[in-house]
Amino acid sequence: MTWTITWENKRLPRMKMPVLIEGLPGIGNVGKIVADFLAAELKAKPLASFFSPTLPHSVFVTEDNLIKLPSIEAVWIPSSVLKNGHDLILILGDVQPVDEVASYGLTDAILDLCEKCGVEEIITLGGIGLPIAPKKPKVYCTGNDPVHVASFVKGTSLKTGLYGLVGPIIGITGLLLALATKRAIKAVALLGETAAHPMYLGIKASGEMLKTLKKKFGLSLSLTQMEKEIRAVERELMKRTDDLQQISKSTALKRLKGKLSTDVDYIG
């Protein structure tokens, strides 16, 4: 299925050395917490939205008793907000695709947006699920170019020894790295340690990630109240994401049963 990009304005804003940061839901919602926090604190402006009929077949009931489709969108933070001259584009959403075709389709749509906006670098954000959340989580970095990874890690507390620690990086967080290579866009992923429990929020891992991004891009952020603010906002967002994941898993389970013609008790 194709993904449709709907632009907020016909004329794109002029951007300086734009960097795209993806923060869709995932393990511990680490990436989502970071991206949502950046968008709120830096007063991001709407840029574009993505739509496909492969999104979960459900709607939310909002506080004003109306309905809303699950959304995936791009927002923009102008370089005037940052200290090192970059514009930032954030990919935010209530959910990310659960099947392979939809995941590749959304990744291509995001990369189309990158090319149209002149994005020079992509950063994807995610979590590493552990049995128990560490008191001081580590954040690891990998990417599609060894020189760029080494440059990105320099002067930070980021770790690079991911091989053997994690399996495949599933979803948009991983696919963007690989498919960006075909479009000559350098990309890295930041992965923070958190608990693997589906209802756990990776607040500490998100905080460590934000510290890295704050230093990297000269962001005007106060992290003192971050945990309190995020917990207040993310309770509802986590419930929304969990509800959508249950719907998506149910749909995927039915598809898999159909393909295998046998009983399947779970989706990993």
Image: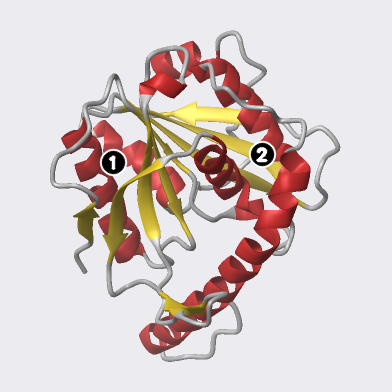
Near mark 2 (Cα within 10 A), the count class, few <14, some 14-19 or many ≥20, is many
Q: Which mark is residue 206?
A: 2
| Residue 254 in view, yes or no | yes
Q: Is residue 237 above or below residue 243?
A: above
Q: In the rendering, at what x and y percent does residue 41 appear?
A: 57, 37
Please state, as top left, top right, bottom left or bottom right, where the C terminus lies in the image: bottom right
Q: In the rendering, at what x and y percent does residue 246 appear?
A: 57, 77
Instruction: Residue type at mark 2: give it.
Output: Ser
Classify residue 47 as left or right of residue 77. Answer: left
Classify residue 171 as left or right of residue 54. Answer: right
Q: Is residue 103 above or below residue 39?
A: below
Classify residue 164 as left or right of residue 45. Answer: right
Name the element at disc 2. Answer: helix
Instruction: Residue type at mark 1: give it.
Output: Leu
Name the element at disc 1. Answer: helix
Closer to the observer: label 1 or label 2? 2
Near mark 1 (Cα within 10 A), the count class, few <14, some 14-19 or many ≥20, is some
Image mark count? 2
Residue with the mark numbered 1: 179
Q: Which residue sits at x=60%, y=84%?
A: 265
Q: Closer to the camera, 247 or 19?
A: 19
Q: Closer to the camera, 103 or 77?
A: 77
